[in-house]
């Protein structure tokens, strides 16, 4: 996550998902921003949806969130979410940028894992998504990725995991399945859901005791967000939910 991304359409989608998945704070949550330095690029500048509310398909999905982002998106700072009531029941760690250097990274995730203990759901928000072979942990650019062992450490201590994953230039369905099976195999999660958008997919790996709870929340999302469809399954318990573009 970069502050420059704050308020773009991917931001709306992730906050709306968290609000629905946590039932507005009925279950507790924590956010691992994985903040990296702004780079001055035009990435994260998809905010036209805020300019014409009457024409936006997102406004009816969550009017309070839409109005909040329309009012605050120019701050370009995730602290705007932290000091609001947009994500009730959510904990945010002290602000700290994630570095590439291996020792600093290890300390970052050791501290965050301890901080997140007890949260029912933990959301990881890397710039790009899950680690890739060409950018090993500790190498330049590795701060843009979360590693499987870092997800597993949080999952193993009792939290369900939600991950932001940006799409790359690969076929979407096989790409999603690859990520689902890699993380699902490492965590031994009983099932997973993937929420697919135009530019990214959100991957949810529930703890066994929360499978029924999240299944009901996913059904509500399907009904509330209307225009999405179920294009297929990874296997009987792994589903993909397409969200509006």
Image: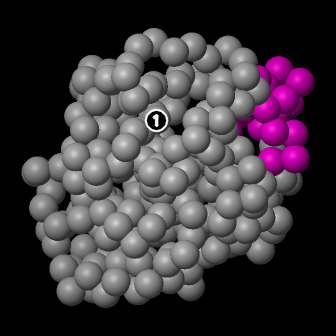
Q: Determine the residue positioned at 87% across, 47% down.
A: 64
Residue 9 visible from this viewpoint: no
- For label 1, the residue is 193
Expressed as whole percent of the image width and height from the top left, the position of residue 136 reads: 13, 61
Specify whether residue 63 is painted magenta.
Answer: yes
Name the element at disc 1.
Answer: strand
Mark 1 Cα shell of 10 Å, populated few (<14), some (14-19), many (≥20): many
Q: Determine the residue positioned at 81% across, 39% down.
A: 62
> Which portion, as a residue range, is magenta?
40-65
Q: Quadrant of the C terminus?
A: top right
Q: Nearer the viewer, residue 84 or 90?
A: 90
Residue 26 visible from this viewpoint: yes
When asked about the image quadrant of residue 90, the answer is: bottom right
In the rendered structure, the answer to whether residue 14 lies left or right of residue 240 reads: right
In the rendered structure, the answer to whether residue 220 lies left or right of residue 177 reads: right
Expressed as whole percent of the image width and height from the top left, the position of residue 225 reads: 71, 25
Q: Determine the residue positioned at 84% across, 53% down.
A: 68
Expressed as whole percent of the image width and height from the top left, the position of residue 190 reads: 37, 43
Expressed as whole percent of the image width and height from the top left, the position of residue 234 reads: 32, 24
- Relative to 210, does residue 58 appear above or below in the rendering? above
- Relative to 173, does residue 100 appear above or below in the rendering? below
Specify whether residue 221 is painted magenta.
Answer: no
């Amino acid at each position: 996550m970069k502050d420059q991304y704050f308020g773009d359409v991917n931001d709306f989608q992730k906050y709306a998902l968290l609000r629905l998945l946590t039932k507005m704070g009925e279950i507790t949550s924590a956010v691992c921003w994985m903040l990296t330095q702004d780079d001055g690029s035009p990435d994260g500048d998809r905010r036209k949806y805020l300019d014409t509310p009457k024409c936006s398909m997102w406004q009816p999905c969550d009017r309070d969130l839409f109005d909040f982002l329309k009012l605050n998106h120019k701050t370009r700072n995730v602290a705007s979410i932290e000091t609001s009531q947009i994500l009730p029941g959510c904990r945010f760690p002290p602000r700290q940028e994630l570095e590439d250097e291996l020792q600093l990274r290890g300390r970052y995730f050791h501290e965050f894992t301890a901080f997140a203990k007890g949260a029912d759901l933990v959301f990881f928000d890397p710039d790009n998504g899950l680690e890739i072979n060409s950018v090993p942990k500790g190498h330049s650019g590795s701060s843009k990725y979360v590693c499987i062992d870092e997800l597993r450490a949080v999952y193993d201590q009792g939290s369900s995991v939600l991950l932001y994953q940006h799409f790359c230039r690969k076929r979407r369905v096989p790409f999603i399945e690859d990520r689902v099976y890699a993380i699902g195999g490492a965590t031994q999660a009983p099932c997973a859901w993937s929420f697919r958008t135009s530019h990214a997919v959100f991957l949810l790996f529930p703890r066994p005791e929360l499978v029924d709870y999240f299944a009901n929340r996913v059904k509500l999302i399907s009904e509330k967000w209307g225009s999405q469809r179920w294009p297929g399954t990874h296997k009987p318990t792994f589903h993909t939910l397409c969200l509006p573009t």
